[in-house]
Image (cartoon, rainbow, N blue to C red):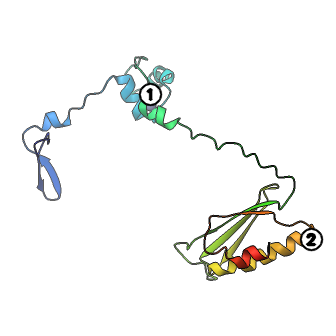
Amino acid sequence: MEDAIVIGIEEGGLYKFRGHSKAALTHDTSSPCELWHRRLAHINYKALPHVSKVVTSLPELKIDHEGICKGCAKGKNIKNHFPKSDSKIEGILELVHSDVCGPMPSTTLSGYVYYVTIIDDYSHKTWIYSLKTKDEVFEKFRVQSSCRNLVERKIKILGFDNGGEYTSRVCGIL
Ligand SMILES: [Zn+2]
């Protein structure tokens, strides 16, 4: 309690400040420009003078902010790209990525709670199969296996996350 600025006393489900209510409600804002920039969803600073001309309830605003808004800087942060892969995939079904997702929070009317994705790296062709149990992954890969026979190619590499659903049965049909 030593660091507390104001102590509130609960009355009827609300906390009412005792004593320093004006001090508690006072908040230091750096400038009206900064304040309205934040209030208007981090609008461009250059637009503020124009907005204040067309919106009657806004004060006259000038561009007088300093530095960079932390919120805007964080919002414009981007993730680093993944490094380019050196692998040379030259045809369909050479590299296939797969993952099983679930169980989903609700079961479908048909009783499915999982789904498996199978993505061909070369063509980006994606298959998604609904599953009632994880062990149905084998059956879906068997279907894929028959597909690859149509194009006379074999899956050379299967990328997965070492989940238990990718048993030796699945790997055996590749
Ligand atoms: Zn901002």
Residue 113 visible to an observer of this rendering: yes
**Element type where label 1 sits in the image:** loop
Q: Earlier in the sequence, mark 2 or mark 1?
A: 1
Vertically, is 142 above or below 97?
A: below
Kindly identify which residue carries mark 1: 55
**Rendering coords of residue 168 (x, y %):** 70, 77
Which kind of residue does numbered mark 2 sit on?
A: Leu
Looking at this view, is 114 or 46 the one in front?
114
Rate crowding at label 1 as few (under 14), some (14 to 19) or many (20 or more) other CA atoms within 10 Å: few
**Rendering coords of residue 133 (x, y %):** 62, 81
Residue 58 visible to an observer of this rendering: no
Label 2–label 1 contact, CB within 8 A: no
Vertically, is 64 above or below 121?
A: above
Q: Identify the image quadrant of residue 5.
A: top left
Q: Which mark is residue 129?
A: none
Rate crowding at label 2 as few (under 14), some (14 to 19) or many (20 or more) other CA atoms within 10 Å: few
Which kind of residue does numbered mark 1 sit on?
A: Val
Left or right of 24 in this view: 94:
right
**Element type where label 2 sits in the image:** helix
**Rendering coords of residue 28 (x, y %):** 25, 28
Instruction: Name the residue rendered at 17%, 58% in the picture.
Output: 13
**Rendering coords of residue 50 (x, y %):** 49, 21
Left or right of 107 in this view: 59:
left
Vertically, is 78 above or below 132?
A: above
Kindly identify which residue carries mark 2: 150
Looking at this view, is 171 or 98 the one in front?
171
Give the spatial CA distance, label 2 vs label 1: 66 Å
Q: Quadrant of the C terminus?
A: bottom right
Q: Identify the image quadrant of residue 149.
A: bottom right
